[in-house]
Image (spheres, rainbow, N blue to C red):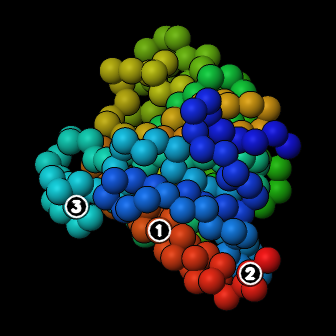
């Protein structure tokens, strides 16, 4: 697999390495191999790719600070070198409290990996068997221990009347997790999202990802993920310190 990096970024970010460099967190550090968590290697190949956007907050918007309704919080920028990183991210997001009542929009071009992420999220939430793409059905629903989940794809959505006829107004007013691909196709009809996830293709396997919260719940999800990345960074540093020097 080719290196997952943008032109001008530092090289050497191999499998299992995490780079969470930011002005608020000090200099970036390469962190050896991934951290073993139970039987899984979690967060392998995650890294923050934009050193100009806050990861855990700024002086004006620190972790735990109150954010006005409708105000966008700091963006969390990540890099997924392959699908295993997408799966690890999905499991980490599922571990965040409150996810079962979130409205999450998934942005990206065709083939960016929106449906792949949704499938990994559904599997991490306990959905078994074949998970169909909602491209043609527009919406698929699942019942889980954490409540109902709606996976919608509005790529083929053209008629606002269909919104009312299909009962989407009631769906989005009701409980449950909502995952929506191509939300811009229903612009003006959808309520405000709690969390936006934008996926950009870097190469055949690598994805650059941006997360931004737009509600108290969305901010909490981003902060929880940012803290998880930082925690793994500290764990990896401790592990690297124990390894014999070459």
Residue 101: % across, % down: 41, 57
> Which residue does the numbered mark 2 point to in the structure image?
245
Residue 141: % across, % down: 61, 47
Q: Name the mark nearer the viewer: 2 or 1.
A: 2
| Residues at marks 2 and 1, CA–CA distance in whole angstroms | 24 Å
**In which quadrant of the rendered image does the C terminus lie?**
bottom right
Q: What residue sits 61% from the left and 30% below the top?
A: 7
Q: Residue furthest right?
A: 1
Q: What residue sits 37% from the left and 41% below the top?
A: 52
| Residues at marks 1 and 3, CA–CA distance in whole angstroms | 15 Å
| Residues at marks 2 and 3, CA–CA distance in whole angstroms | 37 Å
Mark number displayed over residue 230: 1
**In which quadrant of the rendered image does the N terminus lie?**
top right
Query: Which secondary structure, mark 2?
Result: loop
> Which residue does the numbered mark 3 point to in the structure image?
62
**First-in-chain label (2 vs 3):** 3
- Mark 3 packing: few (<14 Cα in 10 Å), some, or many (20+)? some
Residue nearer the viewer, 84 or 19: 19
- Mark 2 packing: few (<14 Cα in 10 Å), some, or many (20+)? few
**Residue 154 shown left or right of residue 163 in the figure:** right
**Residue 62 shown left or right of residue 200 in the figure:** left
Confirm whether residue 28 shows in the render.
yes
Query: Which secondary structure, mark 3?
Result: loop
**First-in-chain label (2 vs 1):** 1
Residue 146: % across, % down: 53, 68
């Amino acid at each position: 697999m080719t290196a997952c990096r943008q032109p001008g970024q530092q090289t050497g970010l191999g499998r299992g390495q995490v780079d969470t460099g930011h002005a608020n967190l000090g200099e970036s550090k390469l962190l050896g191999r991934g951290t073993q968590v139970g039987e899984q290697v979690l967060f392998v190949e995650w890294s923050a790719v934009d050193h100009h956007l806050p990861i855990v907050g700024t002086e004006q918007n620190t972790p735990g600070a109150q954010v006005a309704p409708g105000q966008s919080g700091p963006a969390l920028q990540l890099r997924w070198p392959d699908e295993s990183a997408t799966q690890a991210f999905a499991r980490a997001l599922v571990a965040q409290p409150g996810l079962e009542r979130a409205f999450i929009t998934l942005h990206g071009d065709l083939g960016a990996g929106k449906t792949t992420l949704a499938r990994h999220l559904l599997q991490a939430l306990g959905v078994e068997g074949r998970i169909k793409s909602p491209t043609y059905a527009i919406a698929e629903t699942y019942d889980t221990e954490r409540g109902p989940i709606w996976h919608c794809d509005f790529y083929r959505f053209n008629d606002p009347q269909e919104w009312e006829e299909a009962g989407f107004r009631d769906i989005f007013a009701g409980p449950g997790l909502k995952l929506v691909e191509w939300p811009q196709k229903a612009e003006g009809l959808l309520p405000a999202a709690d969390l936006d996830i934008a996926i950009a293709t870097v190469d055949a396997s690598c994805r650059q990802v941006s997360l931004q919260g737009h509600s108290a719940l969305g901010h909490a999800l981003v902060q929880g993920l940012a803290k998880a990345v930082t925690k793994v960074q500290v764990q990896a540093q401790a592990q690297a310190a124990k390894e014999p020097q070459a």
